[in-house]
Amino acid sequence: MKSSALLAIVIASLAPCTSHSDFELENKRISSAVVSGDADVGDPAVVAIGPRRIHCADTLQPFCSGVLIAPNGVVTAAHCFLGQRPGEPYEVFFGDDVTANGETHGVTRVVTPNGYDGGNGGGDLALVVLDAPASATPATLGTVAVADVGKSVTMVGFGVSNTDDGGGVGTKRSGTALIQSIDSGAFEITPNPAMSCDGDSGGPIFLHGSSGDTVIAVTSFGDPGCTMFAENARLDAYNASFIAPLIASAADAGTAPDPADAPPKNVCSGSCANASECGS
């Protein structure tokens, strides 16, 4: 598959930030923070993704999570960008809490697999290309097989931690679950004792191995109560055809988008003394 054919969504012109509501796919609530998990001050490669802020003093309003897999590449869920206007500008946050200090980056483009039709589970992947390499070390990609059914995995995200009031969004949390079943493009997990929830979409699923933790999937969707199951899109199923070529092309291009597609630089994506330095 040619990488040029994968450039399905391009982040282009500057546009004001808009609110982002949860999506519903096939009457299933998208898993977007981790219920019955714990605050996570590690996992520096895990990010929050939201509309780019208009003013420097604004707090990022994340709608999804993601994970750095290359110096300038973050993988997340494709459904996070459904319904967004062409050219909508996004921002990526590295840190423990979006209300605290962290590293932020603008986004030059978002790409989904060729043929992605808005479904969930397998193929629900997107690569977010950052405006500059991040300081965090990228997570290592891993593989999953039928033999891994029953194994423990760790999910990390910036989503809801309290399903009663929808609280906790914007704080990085992690928790453990068990692999229940595996198919060619996705796998299902069940609580042990935690479960992903609203806002954790696109967040990584880590598998523990003798050589360390590897990211094997990103959260796609789950049950409405965030208590029974979650479906996760496998990365190994799309690495050769989708992820690896895009990472290579982004590196070759030095992360610089075409001038016509490039959003204004340094618009609330770096440090600034006051809002006027963020531009229009």
Image (cartoon, grey):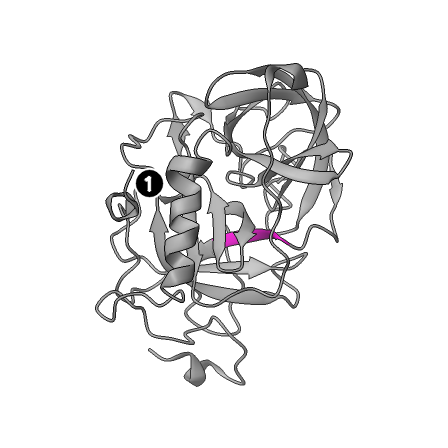
Q: Is residue 53 above or below residue 278?
A: above
Q: Is residue 191 above or below residue 246?
A: above
Quick one: 96 or 141, which is closer to the camera? 141
The answer to if 21 sits in the magenta stretch is: no
Count of numbered badges drawn on the protein: 1
Image quarter of residue 243: top left
Residue 76 x, y percent position in the rendering: 48, 43
Please provide percent x and percent y for residue 59.
54, 64
Disc 1 residue type (three-letter): Leu
Q: Is residue 161 visible?
A: no
Q: Which residues are magenta?
A: 45-49
- Left or right: residue 75 versus residue 144 is left
Picture layout, residue 113 above or below residue 186: below
Label 1 crowd (10 A; few <14 / some 14-19 / many >=20)? few
Front residue of 152 and 143: 143
Q: Toward which corner of the image does residue 162 lie, by quadrant?
A: top right
Q: Is residue 193 visible?
A: yes
What residue appears at the point 40 percent right and 30 percent down from the top-left corner?
Answer: 123
Tell me the quadrant of the picture where the N terminus can be found. Answer: top left
Residue in front for this viewpoint, 186 or 177: 186
Question: Does the magenta stretch mainly form a helix, a strand or a loop?
Answer: strand
Q: Which residue is farthest left?
A: 260
The residue that label 1 is drawn on is 82
- Mark 1 secondary-structure assignment: loop
Q: Is residue 12 left or right of residue 49?
A: left
Task: Pinpoint residue 94: horizontal percent, then vertical percent.
Answer: 60, 59
The quadrant of the rendering that contains the C terminus is: bottom left
Left or right side of 240 for 169: right
Q: Position of residue 115 (x, y in %)?
A: 27, 32
